[in-house]
Amino acid sequence: MERGPRLIYASAMRLAPLLAALALSSACVSVHETTRELPPPPVQEPVAAPAQAPAYAPAAGGGISREEAIRLAFGYAQDRGLHVDRVHHAALDAGGRWEIELRGPEEGDRAKMLLDGTDGRLLKGRFRETGESLND
């Protein structure tokens, strides 16, 4: 079993080129750094963001008020024969439309409407008489 020294010698011979390359690449390299002043960056004036129109721009008169929208919604519901007596929801959405929901007594009639915020036109509506389902 005299393979031990021979194996070490063979391994060292295979590593010799790698060790030589490593020794040559680790030469001391000296870098002289020169300092020079860089010119200052150009001064840019801040640019104002372009003015964006709001998502909802009311008409010259300002559009219809909440009370006017509710009054119109009651009129649309009564024109369809519904018996509604209270406002469940009334809000102006980001698109400038009034979302109105009216309800009748107990589990009575219901009306959900989307009215134009400028002139009160009925854009969309769901109307339910007692006993019918109102799909959302």
Image: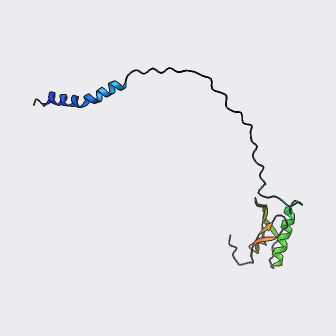
Farthest residue to the right: give it.
61
> Residue furthest toward the left?
1
Residue in the image at 78% along x and 49% along y: 51
Apparent side of residue 34 relative to residue 68 in the rendered image (left or right): left
Question: Closer to the camera, 34 or 73?
Answer: 34
Q: Which residue is drawn at 15% across and 27% down?
A: 5
Compare residues 52 and 29 and report the one nearer the observer. 29
Q: Is residue 63 above or below residue 134?
A: above
Residue 40, by quadrant, is: top right
Q: Which of 27 and 60 is in front in this view?
A: 27
Q: Position of residue 120 (x, y in %)?
A: 84, 68
What is the x, y in percent for residue 105?
A: 78, 72
In the image, taking residue 120 as reference, residue 6 lies left or right, namely left
Tell me which residue sits at (33%, 27%) in the image: 22
Rendered location of residue 113, percent (x, y): 77, 69
Q: Quadrant of residue 56?
A: bottom right
Q: Which residue is drawn at 77% across and 52% down?
A: 52
Image quarter where the N terminus lies is top left
